[in-house]
C-alpha cells in the first residue's frame, strides 16, 4: 500500500474465532465490503496503526491483512446457503444439460456455485483484515463500528512451523508497533478528524 495513512471503517463481524481461543490475541474483523474495496496495491502482511470502536478512545493496534497461511484461510462467506443451493440447481439441471446436448458430449467444466467460487483464494487480493486492538475490552463489540487508521507496515505475511512460533511472531509485532506508534509522525494521526467525525458504516480511503 503506497499511500499511508489509510483510513477505513466498517461494522465488526464474526471471524473464524481463533484469535482469542487459540492465540490469546483477540481480533476484530471487517466485513467483505471493506476488504474488497482495499487499494489494488495492498500487500499482505502485518501493519500497525490506530483504531477506535464507535466513538470510544483511540488505541494502538496491529492489523493482519492476507490469507493467514498457517491456517490456510479462505474467505469466511456470509451468503445464505439457500441462495447457493438455488444456483446449484440451475447449473446442474438446466445449464449443464443444455451445454451437453449442444456439444454432443459432456463439457470439461467444473461448475462452481457462488458459494464455492467466493471461497477460492486470489493471491493478488486480500482475504481477511484482522485488527488486534492493544487494549483490554470488558466485552465483545460485534456489530459496532470499527474505525481504523493504518500508518505503517511491519512485515510480509509468512507461514510458521508451529502455533507457538505464530504467537511469538505476533507478540513481537505488537511490541514493535507500540514503539513505532510513539514516533511523532504517527502520534499526530491519532488526533485526526477521522476519529471525531460522523461514523458511517462503511468507508475506505486515504
Image (tube, rainbow, N blue to C red):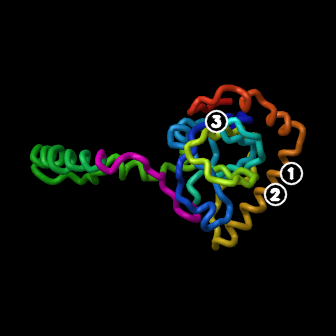
Residue at 66% in and 49% down: 131
User: For residue 125, what is the image quadrant?
Assistant: top right
Asked whether residue 129 is in view, the answer is no
Residue 175, numbered label:
2
145 left or right, relative to 52: left
Nearer the N terminus, badge 3 or badge 1?
Answer: 3
* Magenta span: 69-83
Disc 2, SS: helix
**Real-space CA distance between mark 3 and mark 1, rounded to the nearest whole angstrom:** 23 Å
Per the image, the residue denoted by label 3 is 8
**Real-space CA distance between mark 2 and mark 3, rounded to the nearest whole angstrom:** 23 Å
Q: Residue furthest right?
A: 184
Per the image, the residue denoted by label 1 is 179
Mark 2 neighbour density, 10 Å: few (under 14) some (14–19) many (20 or more): few
Disc 3, SS: strand
Q: Is the residue 118 above or below the residue 199 in the image? A: below
Mark 1 neighbour density, 10 Å: few (under 14) some (14–19) many (20 or more): few
Check if mark 2's residue and mark 1's residue have beta carbons within 8 Å. yes
Residue 101, numbered label:
none
| Magenta stretch: helix, strand or loop mostly | loop
Disc 1, SS: helix
Residue at 51% in and 38% down: 33
Residue at 88% in and 45% down: 182
Asked whether residue 102 is in view, the answer is yes
84 left or right, relative to 15: left
Task: Confirm whether the magenta stretch covers residue 13.
Answer: no
Check if mark 2's residue and mark 3's residue have beta carbons within 8 Å. no
Most foreground residue, 21 or 153: 21
Image spot of residue 168 (x, y percent): 73, 67
Nearer the N terminus, badge 2 or badge 3?
Answer: 3
Amino acid at each position: 500500500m503506497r499511500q499511508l495513512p489509510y483510513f477505513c471503517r466498517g461494522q465488526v463481524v464474526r471471524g473464524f474465532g481463533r484469535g482469542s481461543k487459540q492465540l490469546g490475541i483477540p481480533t476484530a474483523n471487517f466485513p467483505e465490503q471493506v476488504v474488497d474495496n482495499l487499494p489494488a496495491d495492498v500487500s499482505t502482511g502485518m501493519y500497525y496503526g490506530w483504531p477506535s470502536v464507535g466513538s470510544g478512545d483511540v488505541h494502538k493496534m496491529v492489523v493482519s491483512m492476507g490469507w493467514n497461511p498457517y491456517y490456510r484461510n479462505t474467505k469466511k462467506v456470509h451468503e445464505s446457503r439457500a441462495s447457493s443451493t438455488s444456483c446449484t440447481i440451475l447449473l446442474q439441471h438446466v445449464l449443464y444439460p443444455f451445454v451437453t446436448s449442444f456439444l454432443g458430449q459432456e463439457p470439461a467444466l467444473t461448475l462452481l456455485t457462488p458459494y464455492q467460487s467466493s471461497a477460492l483464494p486470489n493471491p493478488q487480493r486480500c482475504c481477511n483484515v484482522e485488527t488486534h486492538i492493544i487494549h483490554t475490552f470488558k466485552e465483545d463489540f460485534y456489530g459496532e463500528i470499527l474505525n481504523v487508521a493504518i500508518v505503517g507496515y511491519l512485515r510480509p505475511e509468512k507461514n510458521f512451523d508451529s502455533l507457538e512460533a505464530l504467537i511469538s511472531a505476533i507478540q513481537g509485532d505488537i511490541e514493535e508497533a507500540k514503539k513505532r506508534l510513539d514516533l511523532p509522525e504517527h502520534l499526530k494521526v491519532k488526533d485526526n478528524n477521522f476519529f471525531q467525525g460522523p461514523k458511517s458504516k462503511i468507508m475506505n480511503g486515504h
